[in-house]
Image (cartoon, rainbow, N blue to C red):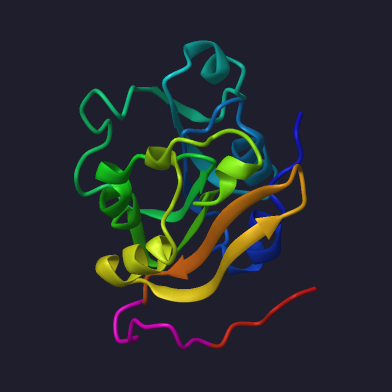
Amino acid sequence: MSEASPWLERWAHLLPANARSLDLACGHGRHTRWLLAHGATVTAIDRDAAALASLPAAVRRIEADIENGPWPLPDDSRFDAVIVTNYLHRPLLLRIAKSVAPGGILLYETFAQGNERFGKPSNPAFLLAPGELLTLADAAGLRVVAYEDGVAALPREACVQRLCAVRPAPGEAAGHVALYELRA
C-alpha cells in the first residue's frame, strides 16, 4: 500500500472528527485507507472496478466514469473532507469544490504546467495553469489555508499545485486570510 500524500498528512489536523469524506478518482485507495484509519467515513469514486473492489468493506464504493457519464452523487451531496490527488478534469472542478460542506476542507493536489519537462502527464489538458486552484477556491467561496505551486522532489520530480481550503462555517468570511494551527 502506498503512503498517504504528505499534503494530506500535513493538513489532517483540520479534518473534522469522524469526517464524512470523498476520495475522488481514488485509484487503489491510499487516501481512502488513510482516512478510514483516522476515523472518517469514506465515499470512494473511481472508474476502475477492480481497484474499488480492493477497498475495505466499510467504504462506500462508487464505480463511475465521471468524465464521460453523469455525476454519480446527488447535487446536494456535501462532505466534511474532499480529497483529490493526481486528477484533473476541468469541467468538474467547481462541482468538486462545491461538494465541501460548511466547516469542511478541500485538499487538492495535482500536476501543473511545466511538468512536461519531467515526463507525464505532459498534455496541457491535464496540467493546471498558474493560480488555477486559487481561482477555483475563489469561485467556490472557499477560504484558502495553504497553496503551493512549484517543483516537488518526491515521490518523483514533478511540477505540482496543492491547495488546502475550507468552506467557512455560517457567519465566517471567505477569502485568503485565515489563522490555523500549523503542526510540524
Residue 98, quarter of picture? bottom left
Magenta-colored span: 169-178
| 120 in relation to 49, above or below | below
Look at 66% across and 82% down and name the residue there. Answer: 181
* Residue 98 appears left or right of 175: left
Residue farthest to the front? 117
Residue 71: give x, y in percent of width and height: 24, 33
- Identify the image quadrant of the C terminus: bottom right
Verify whether residue 175 appears in magenta.
yes
Look at 37% across and 70% down and name the residue there. Answer: 167
In-front residue for pair 158/9: 158
Look at 26% across and 67% down and name the residue there. Answer: 139
Residue 132: give x, y in percent of width and height: 38, 61
| 133 in relation to 169, above or below | above
Verify whether residue 119 appears in magenta.
no
Residue 66, quarter of picture? top left
- Identify the image quadrant of the N terminus: top right
